[in-house]
Amino acid sequence: MPEGDTVWRLAQRLHEALTGTSLTRCDLRVPRLATVDLTGRSVLEVVPRGKHLLTRVEGALTLHSHLRMDGAWRIYAPAERWRGGPAHQIRAILGTAEHTAVGYRLPVLDLLRTADESRAVGHLGPDLLGPDWDPAEALRRLLADPGRPLGEALLDQRNLAGIGNVYKCELCFLLRASPWLPVGRLTDPERAPALAKKLLEANKHRPARITTPSARPDRRLWVYGRAGRPCPRCGTPVRAADQGPAPEERVTYWCPACQPAP
């Protein structure tokens, strides 16, 4: 699933491609939006909110989308071949004279009044890459259920908006805390939102995510995806296990030496 930095980067690309001119094509291929036609309206801006995308259109309307596991937006020049997947996977087409944005496999696609955006994103916690970032509020939400495992609390978008499974694992490692540690027992808990903010800010302009001091492809991440391989810090084999309630469980990676069990 794309994380907050990836969605932030995508929003910038969509904003640059679509804003400033009127839509010459609009095709929303979900049943409840099949009759909607935004042709002739200008895209005012495309903004991220955590992992959500808000495309604000002239007339006080917002097209809300979420990529979840395998959704994608692709941007094409007028004569460029579309390569994001077969035609039956296309859920949205927004075109201008210069660019066409095509949404593939979008599990969430809604049209709402811009004034009602809170219906879609109002439940989210402070956005790590947004103008509403509030570390004190993020910490308050994170510690609201002190018995909850740290990994689950970090993934909950109602606490901090933008953290996905990669950052969850990497943050737990950098905090030297087991993902199963009750969040209320975390040493210096204010470091968690501060470090999350630092990591996402550092990566929002990078196509390849890096959380370590090394840019080598095999050393960009501390533990994520490294099950069975030596921990870069201590050499202990990294472990992996599912975490979270079904069907929301995620594969979690951690070093049992650097992150001892609670």
Image (cartoon, helix red, strand yellow):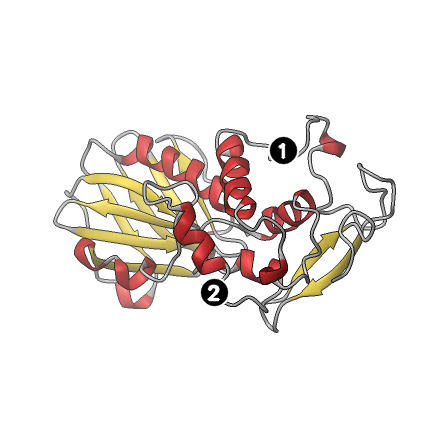
In the image, residue 243 lies at what x, y percent?
Answer: 67, 65
In the image, residue 122 lies at what x, y percent?
Answer: 31, 60
Residue positioned 54% across, 57% down in the render: 155
Query: For the residues marked 1 and 2, what is the alpha-carbon distance in whole angstroms?
Result: 30 Å
Tell me which label, 1 or 2, sits earlier in the chain. 2
**Residue 176's disc number:** none
Q: How many marks?
A: 2
Q: Is residue 110 above or below residue 259?
A: below
Q: Is residue 139 above or below residue 130?
A: below
Q: Does dot 2 land on a helix, a strand or a loop?
A: loop
Q: Is residue 194 visible?
A: yes
| Residue 213 as seen in the image, left or right of residue 204 | right
The residue beneath circle 1 is 210
In the image, residue 15 lies at what x, y percent?
Answer: 31, 35
| Residue 105 as seen in the image, left or right of residue 234 | left
| Residue 225 as seen in the image, left or right of residue 234 | left
Q: Quadrant of residue 219?
A: top right
Q: Is residue 83 visible?
A: no
| Residue 40 as seen in the image, left or right of residue 101 | left
Amino acid type, label 1: Ile
In the image, residue 165 lies at what x, y percent?
Answer: 60, 53
Residue positioned 51% across, 68% down in the render: 145
Amino acid type, label 2: Ala
The residue beneath circle 2 is 144
Q: Quadrant of residue 25?
A: top left
